[in-house]
Image (cartoon, rainbow, N blue to C red):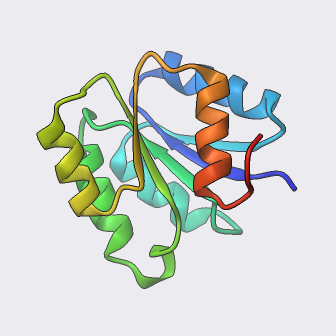
Amino acid sequence: MSLSILAVDDSRTIRDMLRLALTQAGFEATTAEDGVDGLETLKDMSEQPDAIITDINMPRMDGFGFIDAVRAQDTYQAIPILVLSTESADELKSRARTAGATGWIVKPFDPSKLIRALNMVAGKGAA
């Protein structure tokens, strides 16, 4: 079964890299350019994604605000959220967990590890 992933990142290069890695793994990839766009995109999706990937440092609405906004809606409580960021400080990871993030991956990312993590958090087992 193919996973549906929403990837939110303000870098076009990262969005393109994520889209490539996800589609090569047989996943359906939807992208958004920041937290505001991510919320609008999530709302417009015909079916909920199996998982969400979000950056932290973005304009308009950062990853923390995005995670808070997603978790504030009962409809999206069960969707795993992975943070994909250049940041690696423990206090930021803790803040993301408190907000409702499921996991944290530091950029640059290894596509195979990302796919494995997505399969794990989405409950589909190992890749």
Instruction: Judge by depth and name the residue closer to the eye, 62 or 104.
Output: 104
Q: Quadrant of residue 56?
A: top left
Residue 19 percent coordinates (x, y): 66, 30
Q: Residue furthest front?
A: 126
35 left or right of 5? left
Q: Quadrant of residue 67?
A: bottom left
Instruction: Judge by depth and name the residue closer to the eye, 110 or 33.
Output: 110
For residue 49, above or below residue 87: below
69 left or right of 124? left
Which residue is drawn at the image coordinates 35% and 48% (left, top)?
35
Q: Residue furthest bottom?
A: 74
For residue 110, above or below residue 92: above
67 left or right of 44? left
Residue 114 percent coordinates (x, y): 59, 33
Q: Residue furthest right?
A: 1
Which residue is drawn at the image coordinates 44% and 36% (left, top)?
33
For residue 93, above or below residue 20: below
Q: How many marks?
A: 0
- Screen quadrant of the N terminus: bottom right
Q: Quadrant of residue 20?
A: top right
Which residue is drawn at the image coordinates 50% and 20% (left, top)?
109
Residue 50 percent coordinates (x, y): 65, 60
Residue 104 percent coordinates (x, y): 38, 40
37 left or right of 47? left
- Screen quadrant of the C terminus: top right
